[in-house]
Each structure stands twice: as structure tokens, then as C-alpha cells.
Image (cartoon, rainbow, N blue to C red):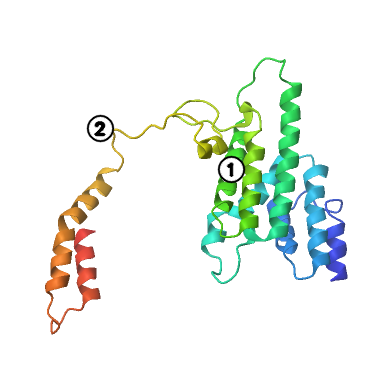
Amino acid sequence: MDLLKACYEALPTLWLRSSKLSSTLGCLMDAVAHVNPLIGQAATDALQRFATATGDEMSVVLHITRWLFVSEAILQSDPVVDLMCEHQPMLELWLLLVSGWAERMKSAAHNTSTEAPSPKPDPTSQLVGQIEAGGLFLICSAKLQVRELGLKVLRIVANMPDACQPEVALNAGPFRLAEALQGTIGQAEYRRESERSLNLMDEDHWNKWLGLSFLVNSLMSSTPSHCHMTGNSLILSIWNTIC
């Protein structure tokens, strides 16, 4: 344990630039939730040093955000165990890193406000979108502390400059999820009947299902108990016909 703690304390000073940053950050994120609190604290401190010492704070925030909320990690997690993104020390670290990065982005935007407008920084707006998605995921949690932290993240993002905000096609302007949740983003636009929402193959399957849904219910209700075809095999054969 002492050797592992010493290794974490030596990062990023002894970090090899040739090694993958994502792998190193992933190991540190795993260690934040270590059963030994000293190891967890050492990993937390190392992640904060990575964000400030490597000169690429945005990459660190991006890797940690993806590591926390990547769909594979959530879908493949054990339903009995809490998600890693619901681990309180992990969330507090993420909030701290996002807050520090957002403050520096606001300072940079303020210092360049008098200069000619520059093209939208796509990587920045994409990261903001991922952070907002993570915050939206957290406010759906059953845990009050997790929801509160998710709201803090959304408020931090809402206060970032317009140049950092993602744009949407509906209004071709900065989109803030916090404003959308408060209903202050403007009138919603809905898809018109003339606009196609499904591709032709999906529409064909959907129409088949609509046409056979009544048939399925009729067959299931009228199938005698002595019929050689069980309910499951009947449903399977019908689905094979539809698909």
C-alpha cells in the first residue's frame, strides 16, 4: 500500500509522456474509490496535479468526464453496486475540476473580449455538452446529494461564455441545458407531419407491427390450453414474421 501511495504521489512528475494519458487517468480514477482512504486521497491529489501541471487541463477534464459517464461503464455495471459516477468523493473531484476549468475559460474569454471574434472552439463546446449530459444524468439519481451536485455542475456550465456553449439547429445560438430545464430557452419546435422521422425500413417494420398487433392479441386470447404451441413460441414466430 505504501509503495502504491508513493507512486501516486510521484505523479505527474515521474509520468512518462510516451504512455497513454487516458490509461493513467483511468487507473487514478479507479484508485479514488479505493477501500484505503489514504490511497484514494493520493489518487485524488494526483488527478488535480495532472489538471494543473501538464498544461492540458481540458484533456484531463474530458478524459475524466468520459470515464465517468461512458455508456459502456454504466450498462455493464453491477446493478447491486453503486455506479462509479455516484461515488461521492469521485463526484466532488469532478465538480472541482470542472469548476476550475470553467473559471479559467471565463477568464480567457474576458481577456480576449476586446479582440476580433474568433471561430467557435468546437472541442470546448463539445466538452461542455458532455459535462451537461453528465449533470443531467446525475439529477435523475435517486440520491439527493448526487442530484444536488449535478445541479451545481449545470449552473457552472450555464455561467460559461456563449463562445463555449454548444449550438443547436433550432435557434442557431448558444444552448444552455439549465435554461431549457427552467423553460426560458424559448418556444419549442416540434416535427411537422411532412417531416420523416423514421427511415423506410423502420417505417415498414412499424406498419407491420401496427397491422399485426390486433392479430397478436387475438391469437394469444384464443389459443386453447391444449395447443402444442406455447405462448412464447407463438410470440417468437410472430416476431420472425414481422422482422
Relative depth, front residue between 193 and 197: 193
Residue identifier under label 2? 194
Above or below, comparing residue 211 to residue 98 in the picture = below
Left or right of 2? Residue 134 is left
Place residue 127 in its image quadrant: top right
Task: From the viewer's side, name the closer residue of 9 and 209.
Answer: 209
Q: Secondary structure at mark 2?
A: loop
Quarter of the image with the N terminus is bottom right
Location of residue 13 with respect to 220 vertically, above or below: above
Q: Position of residue 83 (x, y in %)?
A: 60, 62
Q: In the rendering, at what x and y percent does residue 152 appear?
A: 66, 45
Marker disc for residue 132? 1
Nearest the camera: 119 or 165? 165
Q: Amino acid at mark 1?
A: Glu
Up-down: is 114 above or below 223? above
Q: Residue at x 73, y 39 (%)?
A: 101
Element class at badge 1 = helix
The disc labelled 2 sits on which kind of residue?
Answer: Ser
